[in-house]
Amino acid sequence: MNKESFIDCERKRLNKILAFRLPHSWLYIGGIIAGVSIILMFVRAFALDGDTQGLRHVLQKTLLVGLLLMSIAKDKQEDEMLVQLRAQSYMMAFIVGVVYALVMPYVDFGVSSVVHQGGEVLKDLGDFQVLLFMLMIQLLFYHNLKRFR
Amino acid sequence: MENTIKVQRAIHNFTQEELAQRIGVSRQTINSIEANRYVPSTVLALKLSEVFGIPVNAFFSLTANDR
């Protein structure tokens, strides 16, 4: 394989990955998974006793998977404008997510210092919180951009 | 960029939905193009040209902001 055909092959593979989308039905499947995860989170928090940390972690992961499926599912009639809107929403989610991860620990620290009167430590955000926020921002922006197109 | 797609659509007696179906996009995309909120790709512009039977620059033109 010469250099040009190797680059061509890599480019084709990359384009194939970039164009990957799940069928539209996955939007509903993702929604159901996310919805059930949220309901079970409430059940775990208010109705279950004992050590349920393992279940909490599983539900956090399934919520993220559900939202990710919703995020990468195709629209009913996916055209080039929707592809552009989707790209814009991912860009916004990335920027807002990074700002959130940078700013939120200080906001948390400030609020808890005021409420608990000292002795607080500055804590970083967990991966679940950042990923959940980014996925929610992406879905929110995408559906808003779609509504106002 | 501005366009006269609405005029061309009226000449050919197409609704937004019919035009959208002919070029394989959604009705909202046609609406956004007509309102100059979205600039279509070259492929889409050429599809429109094919449907209207006129060159692309007969219904798309640059504005002062584009120069």
Image (spheres, rainbow, N blue to C red):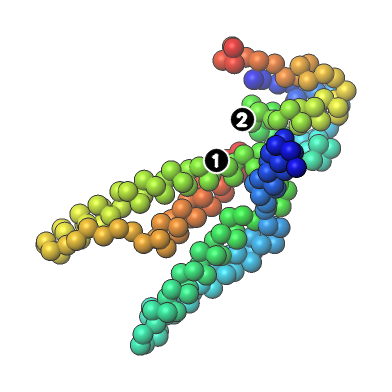
> Where B62 sits versus A142, above or below?
above
Residue at horizontal 17 percent and vertical 62 percent from the top: A120
Q: Quadrant of residue B47?
A: top right
> Closer to the camera: disc 1 or disc 2?
1
**Category of crowding for the residue at label 2, using alpha-carbon neighbours closer than 10 angstroms: few (below 14), some (14–19), many (at least 20):** few
Is residue A42 at least partly visible in the picture? no
| Nearer the observer, A34 or A62 | A62
> Where A81 sits versus A53, above or below?
above
Q: Chain of mark 2?
A: B
Q: Quadrant of residue A110?
A: bottom left
Q: From the top left corner, tell me how far across and down residue A145 is, in percent.
A: 56, 42
Q: From the top left corner, tell me how far across and down residue B11 is, in percent.
A: 84, 23
| Nearer the observer, A20 or B27 | A20
Residue at horizontal 79 percent and vertical 40 percent from the top: B24
**Disc 1 target residue:** A88
**Disc 2 target residue:** B37
To the question of a shared chain for discs 1 and 2, the answer is: no
Q: Secondary structure at mark 2?
A: loop
Q: Quadrant of the N terminus of chain A?
A: top right
User: Tag 2: residue type?
Assistant: Arg
Residue at horizontal 61 percent and vertical 30 percent from the top: B37
Q: Chain of mark 1?
A: A
| Nearer the observer, A129 or A2 | A2
Residue at horizontal 59 percent and vertical 12 percent from the top: B67
